[in-house]
Amino acid sequence: MTSLPPTAGAACQRCQVTLKRTAYEVRTGDGRSLRCLRCTLTDRPLVVRSLVIAAIVGTLLTAINQGNIILQGDASAALAWKIPLTYAVPYCVATAGALLNSRVRPARG
């Protein structure tokens, strides 16, 4: 899948901010649209997809890494930050992957 780079002076098709360097191509009901980083990060399908991935991977990692402690009932205060971090990391990785995949840079020259 190839995409056309944004032209000089192109605007985010959601918030209308001028796209200076990098734009992100997002699928919409009407096809595809160019968006700024802020609008791409708040795009509902991207957020939902990243949350689903974080829920699956985070649960697996928590079960593997902390399962015995949780099942024994010896949960310490350290788990209060370890478990949320275990879910946050896959969310960030999934979101970063989606951003890198949808990035469109202007042609150099």
Image (cartoon, rainbow, N blue to C red):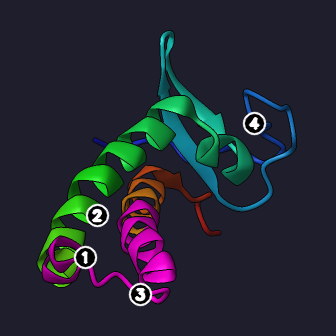
- Magenta segment range? 68-92
- Residue 2 is a magenta residue: no
Mark nearer the viewer, 2 or 3: 3
Amino acid type, label 4:
Cys
Q: In percent of the image, x 28 and y 84: which residue is there?
A: 74
Are dots 4 and 1 in contact, CB under 8 Å? no
In the rendered image, which residue does mark 2 sit on? 58
Q: Secondary structure at mark 2?
A: helix
Q: Earlier in the sequence, mark 4 or mark 2?
A: 4
Are dots 1 and 3 in contact, CB under 8 Å? no
Q: Residue furthest front?
A: 73
Relative to 10, is 49 on the left or the right?
left
Mark nearer the viewer, 4 or 2: 2
**Which mark, by number, is residue 76?**
3
Mark nearer the viewer, 1 or 2: 1
* For residue 69, above or below residue 86: below
Amino acid type, label 1:
Gly
Q: In percent of the image, x 86 and y 45: which residue is there?
A: 18
Q: Secondary structure at mark 4?
A: loop
Q: In percent of the image, x 35 and y 66: which residue is there?
A: 90
- Residue 87 is a magenta residue: yes
Q: In percent of the image, x 65 and y 59: which residue is there?
A: 22
Are dots 1 and 2 in contact, CB under 8 Å? no
The image position of residue 57, as x and y in percent, is 22, 61
